[in-house]
Image (spheres, grey):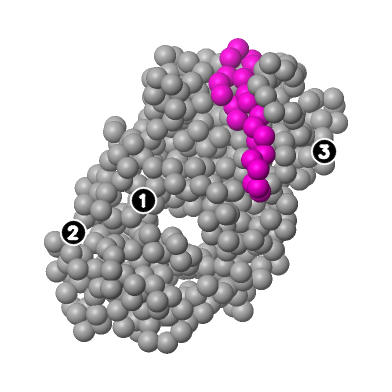
Amino acid sequence: MTRRSYDIVIVGSGAGGGTVAQELSPLCREGVRIAVLEKGPKLRDEEFTGRELEMAQALYEDSGGFLTAEQTMTLAFGCAYGGSTAVYTGTSLLPPQRILERWNVPQLAIADVEQRARKFAEENNVHFLEDSLINENNRLFVEGCRGLNYRVQQFPVNLKGCRGSSLCNLGCPNQAKQGTNRVQLPRAESNGVEVITRCEVLRIGEKTIFARVHAKPAGGKGEPSSWETGDYQIDAQVIVVCAGAVNSPALLMRSGLARKLSRLGHGFTCHPAIIMVAEHNRAITNFVGHPKSFYLDQFAESDRFLLETCMYFPFITAKAMAGFGKEHSRFMQAFARLQMILVLACDEVSAHNRVIIDGAGRTSVHYRFTPEVMRGLVQGSITSAKIFFAAGAVRVHLPVAQFPTIERAESERLDQIAEHPDFKPGKLSISAAHLQGGCAMGSGPRDSVTDAYGRVHGIPWLFVADSSLFPNSLEINPYLTIMALADRVAETIRKEARTLL
């Protein structure tokens, strides 16, 4: 086993890890040694081909096929230089005040979190997309919403030089999306932070990390690790865990901390999602232009769902549709005429839903659909169908119906279907976005894992800085909120550097 030593080690390079690395990087000028350990690879610009299967394999955990223990939902999260910021669409919303108030975390000032989120919104060029890049898939969503008097809104996005490839979820081939892989990590590295890719952290000991560096697989994408293949013991005065809502709690469990922290792994939330598809009688611009420019959140509190524009690739679209055979084929053959909407259910902390490890240390996520989540997915699907028809669609694929193809002449049946949906977990293709919780902030070890500054209770040198800190669902894309909380963690470490280091 090779032994290395640093002052600060950051585990993970996504929105949390990249932010902490950048904000701590000025310490390198004072001789502080900082390393980021990233499990995934760093791809060269020319390797972002947009080919669906190869990019999923290169950029996602388990190639995008990580299933819950019940095998009823897929959890999508990145595993690459930049983490999930490399594979999401760039939507960048400020944290909702009502949600932060509901969290009620002592010493977490709402104004402070918002101010920090605004700082990163400016740093990452967050703005409303220009009209020339808004395609018909998005415009039809706006048209349908307005026809029904829904309060449709435009997403601010973190883009610079977008060329409308619509491949955001496969890693931008034009380097336009301003994730941590394009902004925070390069700045951190230019200041002296080392980023070691293909480095899987196995467990944490007393101010030490045990990790394994993997070789680049034959024919695989990405650069080889800067370290030789093998096992490492990495000593550090400060460790910041930023491995995400699945891997951060699992890592702390493998490190034996569940005995001290009873809430570790509990409080996992996400946005269970269904892809809705509708066919128009003419070709529309759907896979050219930015895929996600508008959303509808007016039903988030009352019916527990959000709607977003989206555009997915043929494999994902085919997998997302219920059933098979003639009707399935009919929609797929009409791909150039398809409009899509993403339905996201807003869940809440549930006693059943949590991250665990088995006796061998393997990570698993238990997730059971509550009645509220199932209702949110059903009502969101019905509302999407109404928007499709209001925008001129001739037929809709409604996966929560017993017979999923709904012709325009049958649209009056939608409310009846909502009363008697065919919703069976495991039958529908449901994927989860925006994974949160598992290392929640709070007042003490009885109700949480960390304090309001991400410090693990009882361990002054160990911090968490990612979406696992959330005590409950944020109900929106968590990107800017993660960065704001990570900024607080980094500031705490800077202020206490003389004591910690």
Residue span colored magenta? 198-221
Of marks 2 and 1, the one in the foreground: 2
Residue 191 is labelled as 3
Q: Amino acid at mark 1?
A: Pro
- On whether residue 381 falls in the magenta region, the answer is no
Q: From the image, tell me which residue sits under label 1.
A: 272
Residue 422: mark in rendering? 2
* Amino acid on which the number 3 mark rests in the picture: Asn
Question: Which comes sooner in the sequence, label 3 or label 1?
Answer: 3
For label 2, the SS is loop
Q: Earlier in the sequence, mark 2 or mark 3?
A: 3
- Image quarter (top left, top right, bottom left or bottom right) of the C terminus: top right
In percent of width and height, residue 82 lies at 64, 45
Classed neighbour count for the residue bearing mark 3: other residues with Cα under 10 Å, few (<14), some (14–19), many (≥20): some
Q: Amino acid at mark 2?
A: Asp
Q: Is residue 206 visible?
A: yes
- The part of the image, by quadrant, that contains residue 141 is bottom left
Q: Nearest to the eye among marks 2 and 3: give it.
A: 2
Q: Which residue is painted at 51% across and 47% down in the image?
A: 63
Name the secondary structure under disc 3: loop
Residue under the point 78% across and 40% down: 189
Picture residue at 52% right of the left edge, 72% below the top? 287
Residue 33 quadrant? top right
Considering depth in this image, is 75 or 54 the residue closer to the camera?
54
Furthest-front residue in view?
218
Which corner quadrant holds the N terminus? top right
Q: Which callout, 2 or 1, points at the residue further toward the start of the chain?
A: 1
Q: How far apart are labels 2 and 1 at the CA level?
A: 17 Å
